[in-house]
Image (tube, coloured by chain):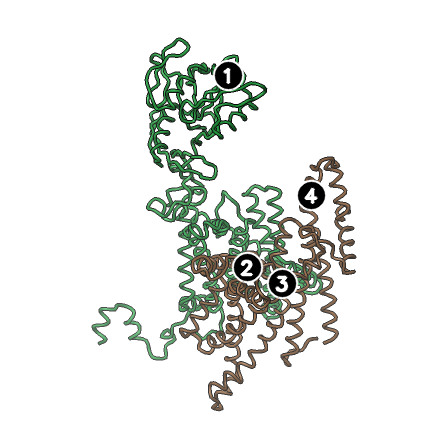
């Protein structure tokens, strides 16, 4: 087991190298519009140096004067030492900006995830136990609708109904207009109030896959021989389902839930952008749009690490939870 | 019952009648393919999905041909636009005119103002005593030693357009009459003039000037306001009216509305002009069932062409994904060992690349480089396809790994069939069912991805329509709240199409699964 984990971690590091190199190369190959715009602005100031001199100076100070491979290793060296550079867009150290916004994304993701679990797992089990019933059709159709709903369209609909027509919520933003005058508890309530629509969007558009996953796995378990045995020896249906079947369904569920924990930090790019919630997703979107290389590199690496971590976690949990699984 | 039924039902019941009980032909057998079809059509959701897809395809591909309008055909309309035509102020300051040869400078004017306010009959300035005499309402004559050297007035005397200026004596005489409310003939400078009720100064038959308290300024460059219009305007202002109709020299009738800005003390006169514009955000009507968009294009037609673009992009991307995925997955699964290892590591790397952020960056870069919208669409398809193949490669590889250990593969090897044929003729067809399911589902997700990007303004661009960039209009909050017909139909179409693919994909998955009970 330990050898397996070590092997996987080493492999993950290798993958991470390749991924960051690809991203770095892509970013460097793009026209460095941000630096050019900056140079253009600086050169237009009275008594300034000509454009080309500014461009060279900026390129040198941002480390863009080296070739891609040399530049990558400089970046890698800095990264390994925990020096992530300064964000061009936000003009603060990347890590500071990251620290400012990540927790909001995490809280939003965590609440949405818990709600998803509470809704999806029971519904999935109901659908599986009454296969081909009306409830099953309704739940399956509901899950597929959730998957098929374009998040941006659904968010806009929610805005139109609840923010514009009913005026229960603000259209976007994290805090209301009177935020600064509120007491600390009211400030908390204000933020919570502004998070309702984004979280609703997140839950509804991503609940479907978990629901279907639960249903499929529950169906598989219900077809197993030991369930037939349990029924044959005369156990009540309640006991068969919740004691024998559900516990076995938990194995894949726990695995996938554990695997999605790192993903809670990745932020919901589209939803945050639509509702102007200053989480990591929106922040990264703003940085990416103007070509802020330090922040983008950091964000992409962060997401890649999260993906690798969740894959690793899934595999490990699979072996830990299910004693039948052996990892060589 | 047998005889009568035989006649009615024909062959079917005859054969049934004559077969023995244990005859094989009594048992209906279906080929595996027919079983799949039967299971598929038993699934109500799958059939619903199929119907939804059929409708969307008809709508997008046939609709565009049936629609009387083109993809980017713009519609125009006449609309009345209110533009500010003239601004009017009422003169509240004294204006001065001095007699020929006399001097009455601004310092003396200030002295006069003080004297006038305090009601003094005279004032001194630079050792000269000026006499002030009120000759009418807001009209003063300033004299030195009994002779008038200047006049101060608020009712402005204007020369007619074709005359340079009126002589001092004419102005003086005209104002004397005007400010006392009288009209009639007067003589000045040895010539005869007449002042009429509207304040026009007439010499012979010709108007040489007019008196008015209002200053009328044209708000548009190069527009000369006629005296006739000014008279009409003054009349309305005197009656405190707010609207009037005036027929200009070109014979066109215009509506004018007057608004008064109390802070600036300006009346602005708005002219309603008929302008030929794009028929923007027109409400649904018979000619345009879903109205028109921001560019005056028929919404329903845009929606049809948008569906075409979205569906075509979906298909091309999935084809790219599948071709890459099947080739690489097939090679990897069949050869195993280091080839498999290498390809699977590449797959791992691709899995790990955050695709949405990467596409957003590339989209923003294409914005920066001003890539032509059509070429941009090709790039978009290539990028989406290139980022999507790893999941298909994994699927194919997994299937092939288990299939290649089976006996029929040993048989192909024993027969000496060449490798490429073994992979693509004997192994891949066995993967097709799973491949079809995955492709159908990923059609839906690719369409969602494209729509999201187009919504963010980073995917398909104007003049091409796609369901995503039609919804993009809601970034204008006025559209979001007022013009539901712009974006809700596009969202519903997108939802129906994606849902159709997912329903069908789900139904196919169940239908292909031999363990399914039904």
Q: Residues within 10 Å of mark 4 (few under 14, many from 20)?
A: some
Is label 2 or label 4 in front? 2
Q: Earlier in the sequence, mark 3 or mark 4?
A: 4
Give a yes or no on whether discs 3 and 2 share a subunit.
yes
Q: Nearer the viewer, residue B166 or B418?
A: B166
Which chain is home to disc 3? A
Q: Is residue A207 left or right of residue B169?
A: right
- The chain that hosts pointer 1 is B
Badge 2 and badge 4 both on one subunit: yes
| Circles 3 and 2 in contact, beta carbons < 8 Å | no
| Tag 1 secondary structure | strand
Task: Using the numbered discs, state the Cα–Cα distance from disc 2 to disc 4 in whole angstroms.
Answer: 36 Å
For the N terminus of chain A, the image quarter is: bottom right
Residue on which the image places disc 3: A266
Tell me: residue B106, above or below residue B508.
above
Neighbour tally class for label 2: few under 14, some 14-19, many 20 plus, Cα within 10 Å: few
From the viewer's side, name the closer residue of B46 and A61: A61
Mark 3: secondary structure: loop
At 69% from the left and 55% from the top, the residue drawn is A297
Marks 1 and 4 sit apart, C-alpha to C-alpha, by: 70 Å
Quadrant in the picture for the C terminus of chain A: bottom right
> How far apart in space, not on screen, are marks 1 and 3 (Cα)?
90 Å
* Residue B422 in sight here: no
The answer to whether residue B337 is seen in the rendering is yes
To which residue does mark 1 refer? B144
Kindly identify which residue carries mark 2: A178
Q: Residues within 10 Å of mark 1 (few under 14, many from 20)?
A: some
> Are labels 3 and 4 assigned to the same chain?
yes
Closer-to-camera residue (B27/B247):
B247
């Amino acid at each position: 087991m330990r050898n397996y984990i070590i092997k996987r971690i080493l492999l993950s590091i290798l993958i991470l190298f390749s991924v960051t190199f690809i991203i770095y190369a892509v970013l460097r190959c793009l026209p460095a519009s941000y630096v050019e715009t900056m140079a253009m602005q600086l050169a237009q100031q009275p008594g300034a140096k000509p454009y080309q001199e500014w461009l060279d100076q900026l390129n040198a100070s941002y480390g863009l004067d080296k070739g891609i491979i040399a530049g990558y290793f400089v970046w890698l060296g800095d990264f390994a030492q925990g020096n992530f550079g300064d964000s061009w867009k936000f003009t603060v150290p990347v890590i500071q900006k990251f620290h400012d916004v990540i927790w909001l994304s995490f809280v939003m993701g965590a609440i949405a995830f818990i709600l998803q679990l509470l809704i999806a797992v029971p519904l999935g089990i109901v659908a599986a136990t009454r296969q081909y019933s009306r409830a099953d059709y309704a739940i399956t159709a509901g899950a597929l609708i959730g998957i098929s709903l374009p998040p941006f369209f659904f968010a806009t609909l929610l805005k139109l109904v609840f923010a514009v027509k009913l005026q229960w919520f603000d259209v976007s933003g994290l805090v209301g207009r009177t935020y600064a005058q509120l007491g600390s508890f009211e400030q908390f309530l204000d933020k919570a109030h502004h998070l309702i629509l984004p979280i609703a969007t997140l839950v509804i558009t991503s609940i479907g896959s978990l629901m279907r996953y639960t249903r499929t796995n529950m169906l598989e378990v219900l077809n197993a021989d030991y369930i037939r045995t349990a029924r044959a020896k005369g156990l009540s249906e309640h006991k068969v389902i919740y004691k024998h079947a559900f516990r076995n369904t938990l194995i894949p569920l726990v695995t996938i839930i554990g695997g999605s924990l790192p993903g809670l930090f990745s932020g919901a790019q589209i939803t945050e952008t639509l509702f102007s919630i200053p989480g990591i997703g929106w922040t990264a979107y703003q940085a990416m749009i103007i070509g802020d290389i330090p922040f983008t590199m950091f964000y992409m690496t962060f997401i890649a690490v999260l993906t690798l971590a969740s894959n690793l976690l899934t595999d490990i949990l699979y072996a830990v939870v299910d004693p039948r699984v052996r990892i060589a | 019952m047998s005889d009568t039924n035989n006649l009615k039902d024909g062959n079917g019941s005859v054969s049934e009648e004559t077969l023995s009980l244990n005859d094989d032909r009594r048992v209906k057998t279906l080929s595996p393919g027919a079983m799949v079809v039967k299971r598929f059509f038993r699934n109500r959701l799958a059939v619903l999905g199929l119907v939804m897809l059929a409708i969307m395809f008809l709508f997008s591909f046939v609709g565009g041909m049936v629609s009387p309008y083109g993809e980017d055909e713009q519609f125009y309309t006449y609309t009345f636009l209110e533009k500010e035509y003239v601004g009017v102020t009422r003169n509240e300051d004294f204006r001065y005119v001095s007699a020929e040869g006399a001097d009455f400078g601004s310092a003396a004017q200030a002295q006069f103002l003080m004297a006038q306010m305090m009601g003094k009959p005279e004032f001194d300035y630079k050792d000269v005593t000026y006499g002030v005499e009120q000759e009418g309402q807001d009209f003063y004559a300033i004299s030195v030693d009994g002779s008038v050297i200047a006049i101060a007035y608020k009712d402005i005397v204007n020369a007619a357009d074709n005359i340079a200026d009126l002589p001092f004596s004419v102005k003086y005489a005209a104002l004397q009459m005007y400010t006392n409310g009288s009209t009639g003939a007067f003589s000045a400078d040895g010539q005869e003039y007449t002042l009429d009720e509207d304040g026009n100064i007439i010499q012979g038959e010709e108007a040489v000037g007019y008196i008015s308290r209002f200053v009328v300024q044209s708000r548009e460059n190069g527009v000369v306001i006629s005296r006739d219009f000014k008279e009409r305007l003054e009349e309305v202002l005197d009656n405190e009216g707010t609207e009037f109709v005036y027929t200009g020299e070109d014979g066109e009738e215009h509506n004018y509305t007057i608004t008064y800005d109390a802070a600036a003390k300006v009346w602005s006169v708005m002219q309603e002009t008929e302008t030929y514009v794009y028929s923007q955000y027109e409400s649904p009507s018979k000619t345009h069932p879903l109205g028109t968009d921001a560019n005056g294009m028929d919404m329903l037609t845009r929606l049809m062409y948008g569906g075409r673009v979205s569906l075509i992009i979906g298909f091309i991307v999935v084809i790219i994904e599948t071709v890459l995925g099947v080739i690489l997955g097939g090679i990897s699964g069949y050869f195993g060992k280091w080839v498999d290892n290498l390809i699977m590591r590449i797959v791992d790397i691709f899995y790990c690349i955050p695709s949405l952020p990467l596409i957003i960056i590339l989209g923003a870069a294409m914005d920066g480089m001003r890539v032509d919208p059509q070429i941009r669409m090709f790039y978009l398809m290539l990028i989406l396809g290139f980022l999507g193949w790893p999941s298909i490669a994994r699927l194919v590889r997994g299937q092939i790994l288990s299939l290649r250990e089976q006996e029929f593969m040993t048989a192909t090897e024993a027969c000496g069939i060449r490798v490429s044929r073994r992979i693509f003729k004997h192994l891949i067809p066995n993967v097709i069912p799973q491949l079809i399911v995955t492709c159908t589902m990923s059609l839906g997700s690719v369409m969602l991805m494209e729509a999201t990007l187009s919504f963010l303004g980073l995917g398909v661009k104007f003049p091409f329509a796609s369901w995503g960039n039609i919804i993009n209009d809601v970034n204008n909050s006025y559209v979001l709240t007022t013009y539901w017909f712009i974006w809700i139909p596009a969202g519903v179409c997108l939802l129906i199409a994606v849902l159709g693919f997912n329903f069908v994909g789900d139904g196919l998955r169940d239908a292909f699964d031999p363990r399914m009970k039904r």
